[in-house]
Amino acid sequence: MTNVCFAGVTGWTAPPILAGIDAADDLTLTAGVSRSAAGRSLVDATGYGEGQVYASVADALRAGPVDVLVDYTSASAVKDNVVTAIDAGVHVVVGSSGLTADDYADLDERARSRAVGVFAAGNFSMLAAILRRAAAIAAEKVGSWEIFDYASETKPDVPSGTARELAETLADVRRPGLGVPIEDLQGPVEARGADIAGTRVHSVRLPSYVVGAEVVFGAPGERLTMKYDPGTSPDLYAEGTLLAIRRVSEAAGVRRGLDTLLFD
Ligand SMILES: NC(=O)C1=CN([C@@H]2O[C@H](COP(=O)(O)OP(=O)(O)OC[C@H]3O[C@@H](n4cnc5c(N)ncnc54)[C@H](OP(=O)(O)O)[C@@H]3O)[C@@H](O)[C@H]2O)C=CC1
Ligand SMILES: O=C(O)C1=N[C@H](C(=O)O)C[C@H](O)C1
């Protein structure tokens, strides 16, 4: 049996994942984290689970048996939560966005030194994972691309975890070419987007968008556009998150990208 603590139990993403844990024979929800629901029982606050809701990950891990922490909190809270779990010897599944490649390098070193597994995916949906894998294949043959990152006007972090992970994945294949180097441009260079691991990433934040991502590959005389477009339900992230909970303990250190669990 794997005991799970879910940080972010009152959030938008939580319900289908909590329902999945509740329905699984091999997983138990033993603790939750949310400042506004702290002190309530999990079942009262969420409809699922056996333990309590705590105000912080540190409190939750002190209180009870936890094998895996799942973090769906926020870009500002996630790194401290992951460090707290690693230091407590607890494996971590990272759903929250906002961590950079440098953050993951720090966490990898820390996790390896404590023989803890950390599994992170910028996007736990199956189709987003397929986009990541398909884009990496395209980058082997096409040397120019840019990424468009779409999200609602209230999303606090840029670029999205989905777009950041995609750019960092493509950087493992190669760095895209630029027609005009950024330093030679005339006009505001921000118009060319942010440099994420060598890829120009353009973040759009408008009402009605849910986080989606588009990568456009350009070659002489032709283009290839790969676009991930989610609907409005958080159900998309449950299956991938449950898979990560079950497999996070397989290896020490940080592993990234749901596609690695689906295809490797
Ligand atoms: N990888 C993926 O596939 C996905 C990633 N995400 C990412 O997950 C994160 C959460 O998204 P979403 O569910 O929409 O967010 P919400 O804002 O709806 O929920 C956030 C949850 O985290 C809790 N929380 C936030 N900050 C803290 C803190 N400092 N200490 C304790 N609890 C905290 C909130 O409770 P309270 O305010 O009461 O503390 C709430 O329960 C975001 O970074 C988002 O980008 C989302 C969906 C899919
Ligand atoms: O903020 C969100 O809502 C989401 N964020 C994730 C990201 O930053 O990529 C992904 C998910 O689609 C929802």
Image (spheres, rainbow, N blue to C red):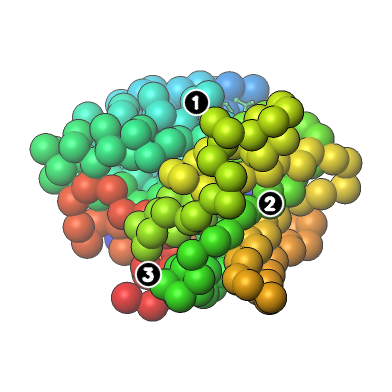
Report helix, strand or loop for mark 2.
strand
Amino acid type at mark 2: Phe
Q: CA distance from mark 2 to mark 1?
A: 25 Å
User: Image quadrant of residue 152?
Assistant: top right
On the question of residue 226 being in view, the answer is no
| Picture coordinates of residue 262, whole percent (x, y) | 41, 75
Q: Earlier in the sequence, mark 2 or mark 3?
A: 2
Q: Which residue is mark 3?
A: 261
The reply to whether dot 3 and dot 1 touch (C-beta < 8 Å) is no
42 and 160: which is toward the camera: 160
Q: Residues within 10 Å of mark 2 (few under 14, many from 20)?
A: some
Amino acid type at mark 3: Leu
| Picture coordinates of residue 118, whole percent (x, y) | 31, 47
Query: Under 8 Å from ligand 1: the CB of mark 3?
Result: no
Q: Which residue is mark 1?
A: 77
Horizontal side of 150 relative to 105 (left or right) equals right
On the question of residue 105 being in view, the answer is yes
Query: Under 8 Å from ligand 2: the CB of mark 2?
Result: no
189 and 243: which is toward the camera: 189
Q: Which residue is mark 2?
A: 148
Residue at left offset 77%, top offset 32%: 154
Q: Quadrant of ligand 1?
A: top right
Residue at left offset 54%, top offset 41%: 181
| Picture coordinates of residue 52, whole percent (x, y) | 49, 33
Q: CA distance from mark 2 to mark 3?
A: 25 Å
Is 239 drawn above or below residue 161 in the view shown? below
Q: CA distance from mark 3 to mark 1?
A: 26 Å
